[in-house]
Amino acid sequence: MKKFTLLMLFMCAGFTAMAQVEIGLQLSPTISGNRFVAEDRYNFEKESNNLRLGVGVVVDYFFAQNYAFSTGLMYRSKGAEITYNYIRENGDGSTEQMSGKDDIAVQYVQLPLTLKLFTNEVAPGTILYFQVGGALNTKVAAQVNNKKVINSEKVIKRFNIFEADAILGGGVEFQMGESTKVFGGLTYHRGLTDIDDFYEKKFGDKNIAVKNNGVSLDFGLKF
Protein backbone atom coordinates (compact mmCIF):
# COMPACT_ATOMS: atom_id res chain seq x y z
CA MET A 1 0.00 0.00 0.00
CA LYS A 2 2.83 2.37 0.86
CA LYS A 3 4.58 1.66 -2.46
CA PHE A 4 1.33 2.24 -4.35
CA THR A 5 0.79 5.58 -2.59
CA LEU A 6 4.34 6.69 -3.36
CA LEU A 7 3.88 5.67 -7.00
CA MET A 8 0.66 7.70 -7.28
CA LEU A 9 2.32 10.74 -5.71
CA PHE A 10 5.25 10.40 -8.11
CA MET A 11 2.91 10.17 -11.11
CA CYS A 12 0.90 13.19 -9.97
CA ALA A 13 4.08 15.19 -9.41
CA GLY A 14 5.32 14.26 -12.87
CA PHE A 15 1.99 15.14 -14.44
CA THR A 16 1.97 18.52 -12.69
CA ALA A 17 5.50 19.24 -13.87
CA MET A 18 4.55 18.47 -17.49
CA ALA A 19 1.25 20.36 -17.39
CA GLN A 20 1.03 23.94 -18.61
CA VAL A 21 -0.73 26.49 -16.43
CA GLU A 22 -1.99 29.80 -17.77
CA ILE A 23 -3.20 32.49 -15.36
CA GLY A 24 -5.08 35.61 -16.37
CA LEU A 25 -7.46 38.41 -15.52
CA GLN A 26 -11.06 38.51 -16.78
CA LEU A 27 -13.74 41.19 -17.01
CA SER A 28 -17.32 40.04 -17.70
CA PRO A 29 -20.15 42.55 -18.26
CA THR A 30 -23.29 40.43 -17.84
CA ILE A 31 -26.93 40.77 -18.88
CA SER A 32 -28.52 39.29 -15.76
CA GLY A 33 -32.07 38.05 -15.23
CA ASN A 34 -34.13 35.64 -13.14
CA ARG A 35 -36.25 32.54 -13.68
CA PHE A 36 -39.12 31.35 -11.51
CA VAL A 37 -40.73 28.15 -10.34
CA ALA A 38 -44.17 29.14 -9.04
CA GLU A 39 -47.91 28.77 -9.62
CA ASP A 40 -49.49 31.10 -12.17
CA ARG A 41 -51.54 32.87 -9.50
CA TYR A 42 -48.39 34.62 -8.26
CA ASN A 43 -47.69 35.94 -11.75
CA PHE A 44 -43.93 36.09 -11.23
CA GLU A 45 -42.31 37.87 -14.15
CA LYS A 46 -38.94 39.32 -15.04
CA GLU A 47 -39.64 43.04 -15.41
CA SER A 48 -36.26 43.76 -17.01
CA ASN A 49 -32.73 42.47 -17.38
CA ASN A 50 -29.98 44.35 -15.57
CA LEU A 51 -26.37 44.97 -16.52
CA ARG A 52 -24.12 43.40 -13.88
CA LEU A 53 -20.36 42.97 -13.67
CA GLY A 54 -17.97 40.11 -13.06
CA VAL A 55 -14.24 40.44 -12.48
CA GLY A 56 -11.53 38.11 -11.29
CA VAL A 57 -8.73 35.66 -11.95
CA VAL A 58 -8.91 32.69 -14.34
CA VAL A 59 -6.62 29.65 -14.34
CA ASP A 60 -6.36 27.17 -17.23
CA TYR A 61 -4.61 23.95 -16.25
CA PHE A 62 -3.72 22.04 -19.44
CA PHE A 63 -3.65 18.26 -19.10
CA ALA A 64 -3.28 17.81 -22.90
CA GLN A 65 -2.39 20.10 -25.79
CA ASN A 66 -6.01 21.06 -26.55
CA TYR A 67 -7.73 20.34 -23.24
CA ALA A 68 -7.67 22.28 -19.99
CA PHE A 69 -9.35 22.27 -16.62
CA SER A 70 -10.43 25.88 -16.14
CA THR A 71 -11.08 27.43 -12.74
CA GLY A 72 -10.29 30.66 -10.91
CA LEU A 73 -11.96 33.09 -8.56
CA MET A 74 -14.54 35.63 -9.76
CA TYR A 75 -16.58 38.35 -8.08
CA ARG A 76 -19.99 38.41 -9.77
CA SER A 77 -23.16 40.44 -9.33
CA LYS A 78 -26.46 38.81 -10.30
CA GLY A 79 -30.17 39.57 -10.28
CA ALA A 80 -32.80 41.67 -12.04
CA GLU A 81 -36.07 43.50 -11.50
CA ILE A 82 -39.01 41.17 -10.90
CA THR A 83 -42.76 41.61 -10.37
CA TYR A 84 -45.35 39.41 -8.64
CA ASN A 85 -48.90 39.36 -7.24
CA TYR A 86 -50.07 38.42 -3.76
CA ILE A 87 -53.20 38.51 -1.60
CA ARG A 88 -53.25 40.91 1.37
CA GLU A 89 -55.67 40.37 4.24
CA ASN A 90 -57.11 43.58 5.65
CA GLY A 91 -58.05 44.27 9.27
CA ASP A 92 -61.76 43.82 8.58
CA GLY A 93 -61.19 40.31 7.24
CA SER A 94 -61.47 41.26 3.58
CA THR A 95 -58.73 40.50 1.07
CA GLU A 96 -57.36 42.29 -1.96
CA GLN A 97 -54.87 41.44 -4.64
CA MET A 98 -51.67 43.43 -4.50
CA SER A 99 -48.69 43.67 -6.83
CA GLY A 100 -45.05 43.92 -5.84
CA LYS A 101 -41.80 44.80 -7.54
CA ASP A 102 -38.27 44.05 -6.35
CA ASP A 103 -34.94 44.98 -7.91
CA ILE A 104 -32.63 42.16 -6.79
CA ALA A 105 -28.84 42.48 -6.73
CA VAL A 106 -26.77 39.74 -5.09
CA GLN A 107 -22.98 39.60 -5.15
CA TYR A 108 -21.15 36.29 -5.09
CA VAL A 109 -17.61 34.98 -4.99
CA GLN A 110 -17.60 32.36 -7.74
CA LEU A 111 -15.46 29.25 -8.12
CA PRO A 112 -15.83 27.99 -11.72
CA LEU A 113 -15.16 24.30 -12.38
CA THR A 114 -15.16 23.81 -16.14
CA LEU A 115 -13.56 22.01 -19.06
CA LYS A 116 -12.10 24.04 -21.94
CA LEU A 117 -11.62 22.52 -25.37
CA PHE A 118 -9.27 24.34 -27.76
CA THR A 119 -9.01 24.03 -31.54
CA ASN A 120 -5.79 24.14 -33.47
CA GLU A 121 -4.95 27.48 -35.08
CA VAL A 122 -7.74 28.70 -37.33
CA ALA A 123 -5.56 31.67 -38.36
CA PRO A 124 -2.01 32.67 -37.41
CA GLY A 125 -1.91 33.04 -33.62
CA THR A 126 -5.68 32.50 -33.34
CA ILE A 127 -7.54 29.59 -31.75
CA LEU A 128 -11.14 28.97 -30.74
CA TYR A 129 -12.27 27.51 -27.41
CA PHE A 130 -15.43 25.95 -26.03
CA GLN A 131 -16.21 25.83 -22.31
CA VAL A 132 -18.63 23.65 -20.35
CA GLY A 133 -19.08 22.93 -16.66
CA GLY A 134 -20.46 24.61 -13.58
CA ALA A 135 -19.70 27.01 -10.77
CA LEU A 136 -20.12 27.18 -7.03
CA ASN A 137 -21.07 30.61 -5.70
CA THR A 138 -20.92 32.03 -2.17
CA LYS A 139 -23.01 35.06 -1.25
CA VAL A 140 -21.04 38.06 0.04
CA ALA A 141 -23.47 41.00 -0.30
CA ALA A 142 -27.01 41.83 -1.40
CA GLN A 143 -29.44 44.67 -2.03
CA VAL A 144 -33.14 44.84 -2.85
CA ASN A 145 -34.46 48.07 -4.37
CA ASN A 146 -31.02 49.60 -3.68
CA LYS A 147 -31.45 49.02 0.06
CA LYS A 148 -29.31 46.88 2.35
CA VAL A 149 -31.80 47.07 5.27
CA ILE A 150 -35.60 46.80 4.95
CA ASN A 151 -37.96 46.85 7.95
CA SER A 152 -34.98 46.75 10.34
CA GLU A 153 -33.69 43.52 8.79
CA LYS A 154 -30.55 43.11 6.71
CA VAL A 155 -31.46 42.22 3.14
CA ILE A 156 -28.56 39.80 2.83
CA LYS A 157 -30.36 37.42 5.22
CA ARG A 158 -33.11 36.92 2.60
CA PHE A 159 -30.76 35.06 0.29
CA ASN A 160 -29.23 31.61 0.53
CA ILE A 161 -25.51 31.44 1.26
CA PHE A 162 -24.67 29.12 -1.63
CA GLU A 163 -25.75 28.96 -5.26
CA ALA A 164 -24.73 26.72 -8.16
CA ASP A 165 -24.99 27.31 -11.87
CA ALA A 166 -24.20 25.61 -15.16
CA ILE A 167 -21.81 27.27 -17.61
CA LEU A 168 -21.73 26.97 -21.39
CA GLY A 169 -19.65 29.23 -23.59
CA GLY A 170 -17.07 29.78 -26.25
CA GLY A 171 -14.68 32.33 -27.60
CA VAL A 172 -11.41 33.11 -29.31
CA GLU A 173 -7.82 33.55 -28.13
CA PHE A 174 -5.12 35.64 -29.81
CA GLN A 175 -1.42 35.05 -29.22
CA MET A 176 0.12 38.48 -28.55
CA GLY A 177 3.60 37.42 -27.46
CA GLU A 178 5.63 34.48 -26.29
CA SER A 179 3.44 33.92 -23.23
CA THR A 180 0.73 36.59 -23.51
CA LYS A 181 -2.76 35.94 -24.88
CA VAL A 182 -5.85 38.10 -25.25
CA PHE A 183 -9.24 36.39 -25.26
CA GLY A 184 -12.88 37.23 -25.71
CA GLY A 185 -16.00 35.12 -25.53
CA LEU A 186 -19.67 34.70 -24.75
CA THR A 187 -20.92 32.59 -21.81
CA TYR A 188 -24.38 31.48 -20.69
CA HIS A 189 -24.86 31.08 -16.92
CA ARG A 190 -27.94 29.07 -15.89
CA GLY A 191 -28.77 29.03 -12.19
CA LEU A 192 -29.52 25.57 -10.82
CA THR A 193 -30.55 26.38 -7.25
CA ASP A 194 -33.04 28.63 -5.46
CA ILE A 195 -31.36 31.87 -4.42
CA ASP A 196 -33.65 32.74 -1.50
CA ASP A 197 -36.51 31.59 0.73
CA PHE A 198 -38.10 35.03 1.21
CA TYR A 199 -41.00 34.53 -1.19
CA GLU A 200 -41.71 31.03 0.11
CA LYS A 201 -42.18 32.52 3.58
CA LYS A 202 -44.02 35.62 2.33
CA PHE A 203 -46.63 33.58 0.46
CA GLY A 204 -46.56 30.46 2.64
CA ASP A 205 -45.68 28.32 -0.38
CA LYS A 206 -42.52 26.19 -0.21
CA ASN A 207 -42.73 25.38 -3.94
CA ILE A 208 -41.68 28.87 -5.04
CA ALA A 209 -38.10 29.19 -6.34
CA VAL A 210 -36.19 32.10 -7.83
CA LYS A 211 -33.09 31.30 -9.90
CA ASN A 212 -30.42 33.37 -11.60
CA ASN A 213 -29.81 33.55 -15.33
CA GLY A 214 -27.26 35.50 -17.32
CA VAL A 215 -25.23 35.96 -20.48
CA SER A 216 -21.76 37.45 -20.11
CA LEU A 217 -19.37 39.01 -22.58
CA ASP A 218 -15.93 37.94 -21.41
CA PHE A 219 -12.69 39.80 -22.00
CA GLY A 220 -9.32 38.91 -20.58
CA LEU A 221 -5.56 38.71 -20.68
CA LYS A 222 -3.58 35.55 -19.90
CA PHE A 223 0.10 35.29 -19.04
Image (cartoon, rainbow, N blue to C red):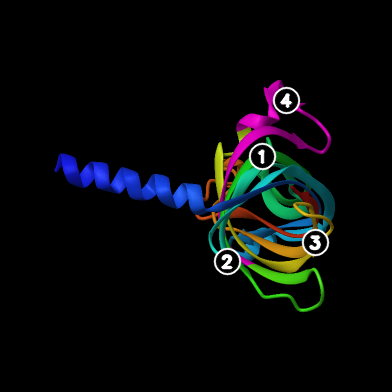
Question: Is residue 172 shown above or below 137?
Answer: below
Write down the region rendered in magenta.
131-157
Q: Nearer the viewer, mark 3 or mark 4?
A: 3
Q: Residue at x 80, y 61 (%)?
A: 175
Answer yes or no: do the residues labelled 2 and 3 have beta carbons within 8 Å?
no
First in sequence: mark 2 vs mark 4: 2
Q: Tag 4: residue type?
A: Asn
Is 1 magenta? The answer is no
The residue where tag 2 is placed is 65
Figure quadrant of residue 5: top left
First in sequence: mark 1 vs mark 3: 1
The residue where tag 4 is placed is 151
Q: CA distance from mark 2 to mark 1?
A: 32 Å
Label 3, residues with CA under 10 Å away: few <14, some 14-19, many ≥20: some
The residue where tag 1 is placed is 108
Looking at the rendered structure, the secondary structure element under dot 1 is strand
Q: Tag 1: residue type?
A: Tyr
Q: Residue at x 84, y 58 (%)?
A: 176
Q: Nearer the viewer, mark 2 or mark 4?
A: 2
